Image: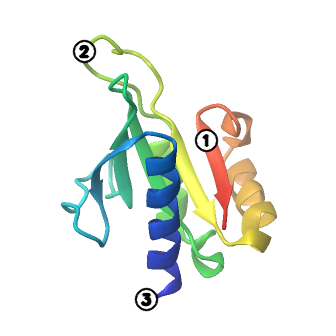
Amino acid sequence: MDEHQRLVNLLISAFQKEGYIILRATGGNFPEPYKIGRHEPDIIATEQSGLIIIGEAKTEDDINGSQSQEQYLDFSNRIMSEGLLKGRRIPLHIIVPKNSSPLLRQSLASLGISNKIGGQIIIWVD
């Protein structure tokens, strides 16, 4: 198993422990995720309330890639478009290797979205 899939699997497990329902995920026995904006996330889950949650795994080599930058922007600006939670912000959970959190924070800051960390963007480390 490669590093990226290992991180995806860790985030799936963490989501399940939090009581989230995994709808789609890369790898495992889940259907493949669909595109949200320009890209497919690694995990699409939901809270018991019905709020959608986006999960993304990044290896250290991938944190600053142009596709990753687009994903951070696309996925951190989502809101629920229908139902009782219409208008509510969709959280983006990003998991990175233990020593890569500062690099991710720097990358999010360079995009002007570091103010969303802890709110709409949640960072996990393995």
Quadrant (top left/top right/bottom left/bottom right) for the N terminus: bottom left
Measure the C-alpha gap from mark 3 to mark 1.
27 Å
In this rendering, would 47 be left or right of 68? Answer: left
Residue 2 pos. (x, y %): 47, 87
Nearer to me, 15 or 51: 15
Residue 4 against residue 88 in the figure, above or below: below
**Amino acid type, residue under disc 2 in the picture:** Gly
Q: Estimate how packed mark 3 is, as few (under 14), some (14 to 19) or many (20 or more) residues with alpha carbons within 10 Å.
A: few
Q: Is residue 37 above or below residue 126?
A: above
Q: Position of residue 23 (x, y in %)?
A: 26, 48
Q: Earlier in the sequence, mark 3 or mark 2?
A: 3
Is 65 positioned to the left or the right of 36 in the image?
right
Q: Which mark is residue 83?
A: 2
The answer to which of marks 3 and 1 sits earlier in the sequence is: 3
Q: Residue at 44%, 19% (x, y): give it.
A: 88
Which disc is residue 121 wearing?
1
Q: Which residue is mark 3?
A: 1
**In contact (CB < 8 Å): disc 2 and disc 1:** no
Local crowd at mark 1 within 10 Å, few (<14), some, or many (≥20)?
many
The residue tagged with tag 1: helix, strand or loop? strand
Residue 93 position, x and y percent, is 54, 48
For badge 1, the amino acid type reads: Ile
Secondary element under disc 2, as helix, strand or loop, is loop
From the image, state whether disc 3 or disc 2 is nearer to you. Answer: 3
The local crowd at label 2, few if under 14, some if 14 to 19, many if 20 or more residues have their Cα within 10 Å, is few
The percent position of residue 18, horizontal first and vertical second, equals: 51, 42
Image quarter for residue 117? top right
Q: Splitting the image into 4 quarters, where does residue 50 fall?
A: top left
Give the mark toward the camera: 3 or 1: 3
User: Looking at the image, can residue 74 be seen?
Assistant: no
Amino acid beneath label 3: Met
Relative horizontal placement of residue 55, taking residue 34 as reference (left or right): right
